[in-house]
Image (cartoon, rainbow, N blue to C red):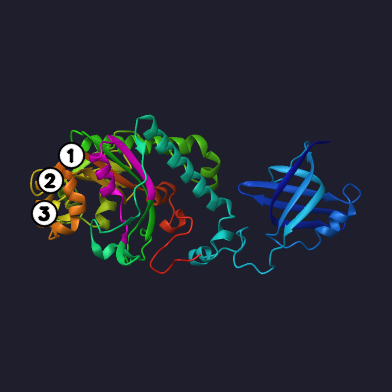
């Protein structure tokens, strides 16, 4: 028995003829599937002529009656069409099969990303990302954090000049930001107590690993009048918990499509500190010289320790050697700094901690790092006019999604990823 009239549109996933009297057209639109059922004697003959030899991935729109008594297998809705409009005929030779009957390697997928995005497994990644970010920003908004927009083009670099992209800016050289942190700090000096920035950053690292892309998104938080770096840690862990909770609430269908069993993490996240970290690594066969930073293998070992001994997949690592961190971090007891990384399932997600707010100390740390104080005066001079104790962090969104969903490559978590060999499409 047919019911209400509906209009649906989508991409043709399959056309299947059963003899001469019956034709099924399966449409794909996002995560939804619609089946158009054409039966001779029930629908107009011109609809058969119109859909004869219809190529996969053509875009059509149909209007008709919903079949209520029995929905076709594999479809969310079955429709007996009364009208069909063919908007676009696809080429018969496709560079990639969105039905995934013929699988493709990641480079082919990224070369043909618009076709790859038609796959529900791929769309699920970005629908989950949207919920994650909304959950995190809602949590920040509800607690008085103000979203600000910091510049992406800056006149100098904040960390390593070798990792910045230079751009021609009229008659001078400018740089794409590595992190919006320095301008967040200036906004704190400007009187904003709690703020965050959600935007794009760039690092000119010639790395072809599964962990790195040259253009990435981060949610970056800064806050004033902190007691120490632990205040920053408490904000970061609760923000992440809220984001994952939103994913669990809103995206069960997408998680099922990806085969991911996601649980909301418990807070607070455990904290490990240097130099204790050296002992943990040594007990698991990794010997790092005292006072030096660890490597990516160490991150995996620390996460394994946290999961097995502390019952958490998230773990903060605090009090890094100052020698391994930028000039703007606050020192703790030498040689350590109030610098915090958050690790998750073997990967660093964020760096942060407490910043140095005293002008004379900040400038001396610039010199200690071998930097020219004059080159950073655009930033440091404002600390002469009153700066509160403050700190923050920048959390990589693609990195969090990659680990959370168990993706094999961070490029899968970027809509159109950029790396040393890819700037198109």
User: Residue 412 placed where, x, y %?
Assistant: 46, 56
Mark 1–mark 2 Cα distance, whole angstroms, equals 8 Å
Position of 48 relative to 140 (above/below) = below
> Mark 3 or mark 2, which is nearer to you?
2
Mark 1 vs mark 3: which is more N-terminal? 3
Residue 185 drawn in magenta:
yes
Q: Is residue 273 left or right of residue 402?
A: left
What residue would you read off at disc 3? 290
Question: Relative to 11, is 380 on the left or the right?
Answer: left
Between disc 3 and disc 2, whose residue precedes? 3
Q: Which mark is residue 387?
A: 1
Instruction: Check whether the beta carbons of the residues at disc 1 and disc 2 lie within 8 A of each other.
Output: yes
- Does dot 3 land on a helix, a strand or a loop? loop
- Residue 359 is tagged as 2
- Numbered range of the magenta stretch: 175-199
- Residue 119 is left or right of residue 157, and the answer is right
Q: Is residue 381 above or below residue 70?
A: below
Q: Secondary structure at mark 2?
A: helix
Kindly tell me whether residue 356 is visible in this rendering. no
């Amino acid at each position: 028995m047919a019911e209400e009239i509906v209009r649906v549109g989508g991409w043709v996933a399959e056309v299947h003829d059963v003899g001469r009297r019956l034709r099924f057209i399966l449409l794909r639109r996002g995560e939804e599937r619609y089946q158009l059922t054409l039966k001779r004697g029930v629908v107009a003959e011109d609809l058969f002529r119109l859909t004869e030899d219809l190529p996969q991935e053509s875009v059509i729109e149909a209007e008709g009656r919903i079949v209520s008594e029995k929905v076709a297998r594999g479809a969310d809705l079955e429709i007996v069409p009364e009208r069909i409009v063919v908007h676009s005929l696809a080429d018969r030779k496709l560079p990639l099969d969105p039905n995934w009957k013929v699988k493709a390697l990641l480079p082919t997928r990224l070369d043909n990303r618009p076709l790859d995005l038609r796959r529900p497994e791929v769309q699920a990644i970005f629908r989950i990302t949207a919920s994650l970010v909304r959950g995190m920003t809602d949590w920040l908004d509800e607690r008085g954090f103000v979203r600000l927009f910091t510049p992406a083009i800056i006149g100098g670099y904040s960390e390593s000049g070798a990792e910045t992209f230079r751009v021609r800016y009229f008659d001078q050289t400018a740089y794409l930001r590595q992190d919006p942190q320095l301008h967040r700090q200036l906004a704190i000096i400007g009187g904003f107590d709690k703020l965050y920035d959600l935007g794009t950053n760039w690092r000119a690292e010639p790395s072809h690993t599964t962990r790195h892309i040259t253009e990435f998104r981060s949610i970056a938080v800064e806050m004033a009048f902190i007691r120490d770096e632990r205040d920053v840690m408490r904000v970061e862990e609760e923000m992440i918990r809220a984001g994952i909770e939103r994913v669990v609430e809103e995206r069960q269908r997408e998680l099922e499509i990806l085969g991911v069993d996601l649980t909301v993490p418990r807070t607070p996240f455990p904290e490990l500190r240097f130099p204790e970290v050296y002992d943990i690594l040594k007990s698991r066969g990794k010997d790092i010289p005292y006072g030096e930073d660890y490597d990516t293998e160490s991150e995996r070992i620390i996460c394994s320790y946290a999961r097995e001994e502390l019952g958490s997949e998230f773990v903060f690592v605090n009090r890094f050697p100052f020698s391994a961190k930028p000039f703007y971090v606050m020192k703790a007891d030498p040689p350590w700094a109030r610098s915090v990384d958050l690790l998750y399932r073997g990967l660093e997600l964020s760096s942060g901690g407490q910043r140095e707010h005293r002008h004379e100390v900040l400038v001396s740390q610039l010199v200690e790092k071998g930097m020219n104080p004059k080159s950073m005066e655009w930033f440091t001079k404002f600390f002469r006019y009153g700066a509160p104790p403050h700190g923050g962090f920048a959390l990589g969104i693609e990195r969090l999604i990659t680990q959370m969903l168990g993706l094999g490559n961070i490029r899968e978590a970027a809509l159109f990823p950029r790396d040393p060999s890819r700037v198109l499409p």
